[in-house]
Image: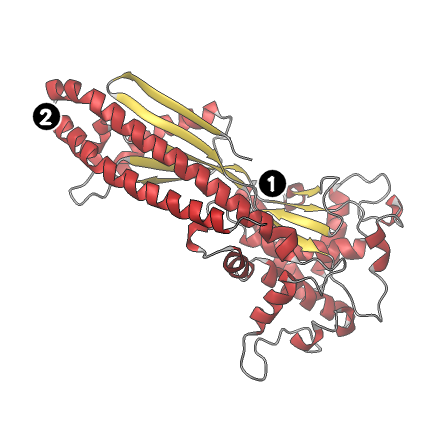
Amino acid sequence: MSRARVRLISCLPLLFGAVVWVSAANANVLRLKTAVSSSSTSFSDEESGSAFSDAQSWLGPGGTLTEDAIHHLIEIIREDAQGAALVAQSIQKARETAHEPFWKVISVCPVGMSPNILGQTNRGERLTIFEGRDLEESTQNLLADGTTNTAHADAFYQSRIEQDRADDGISPDAPEQVKYFRDLVLIKLMTHYPGICLRANLSVDDAVSTLYHEMVHYIASDWSLWPKIGQYSGESDYELQQILRQGDEVDAYLSQWSYEIRKKGKSVLSPLLQPYFDDAGEFIPRDAQGADNRDAIAKLILGGKIFLGGEGYHGLRFVAEYANELRNEQNSQSILLNVLQQVATIDQKNLPYYQQTSSKLYEADQQSIARLPGEENSCKQRLDHINALIAQNVIP
Ligand SMILES: [Zn+2]
């Protein structure tokens, strides 16, 4: 899942740094098939996965994805005023992230995906680089209070960051975020922009609902944000907080169900879901006792009762996602610890050189060496915490 590369530049005393690449985990948000009330049988055919011919598929005869096939779905969604607004936001998002028309960020889901999953939104992928700060710049850009003169530091690192991008074939216009710590530079680079996939064998009707749902995920997707996995007490805490986040499953399903009610009436929904909507498809935010109905919806989505197949997002998404996020964090904290140790070693080696050349650089180097054990320690503590969460999460 992840790839780590350490590049250590230490041949010249003035040019040193540890560069580490950590590939972030894929983060997918899904759409499952919703179970429907017994009065409707329209969904049961596709569940078997066999009653479908290409001609009925949203892809049309031949089964290949075309601009026309996507536009057909989009035109149907645009007949609804809220749907038209969602399409407009998605077009905008594709323009900003991929610099492409929206239809180009839509693909056909890979064969072999669970048959219960109708579509997915990939929130984007990124690389994170930790680089040891160069003392030559840090004496100029590190301010007395320990913060950084960002404009100076950006100018200093620009060519190195550009070189790192080129080395890994990352497009020059892919966005990046740079954050300066006293002894480290953290660089986040977007490597894949967000995108949507729809299953090949969906009817036009199902593809429309699925695309509607995925667009809610899509417009909220942000390559630079990732859950801080160490702050959750365990898997159940993680899944409940994630699913309620803006643009996650609660938002996507509420929007999708509301749209389906506007088109076809409330009977289209499972009887378990009907009490949460009025006849116009408006979500009812609180129950008679004042409790938040979003929490109730979250539990229904995590459980399996409202889905055909009986498996909800707990089993289909979050068990694996939580374990992956923990492993990813364990990996990046281990690498960070390694970088801090390397920076300390290189600084030690550089001391005699700086002592001869510049007392200012020598002082900066000494201060860095004094700080690094503290930084290493807090990194070790984070790693211990993650390891404890991993030990807790072992499934018998
Ligand atoms: Zn979803």
Which comes before the other along the chain, label 1 or label 2?
1
Estimate the spatial distance between the alpha carbons at disc 1 and disc 2, rounded to whole Å. Answer: 53 Å
Q: In this rendering, does residue 61 appear at all? A: yes
Residue 305, labelled with which disc? Answer: none
Left or right side of 249 for 164: left
Between disc 1 and disc 2, the foreground one is 2
- For this orientation, the residue located farthest to the bottom is 288
| Residue 150 visible at all | no
Could you say where residue 294 lies in the image, as x and y percent from the top left? 57, 70
What secondary structure is found at the residue carrying circle 1? loop
Amino acid under disc 2: Ser
The amino acid on which the numbered mark 1 sits, given as a three-letter code, is: Glu
Q: Quadrant of residue 154?
A: top left
Q: Give the answer, above or below, for where 330 lies relative to 396.
A: above
Residue hosting label 2:
359
In this orientation, which residue lies closer to the viewer: 389 or 68?
389
Q: Residue at x 47, y 29 (%)?
A: 4
- The one nearer the camera, 365 or 152, is 365
Measuring from the top left, give residue 66's x and y in whole percent: 76, 41
Residue at image mark 1:
100
Query: Between 16 and 175, which is closer to the camera in this rendering?
Result: 16
| Some atom of ligand 1 lies within 8 Å of the CB belonging to the residue at label 2 | no
Residue in view at x 64 percent, y 56 percent:
313
Vertical position of residue 176 compared to residue 357: above or below: below
30, above or below 25, in the image: below
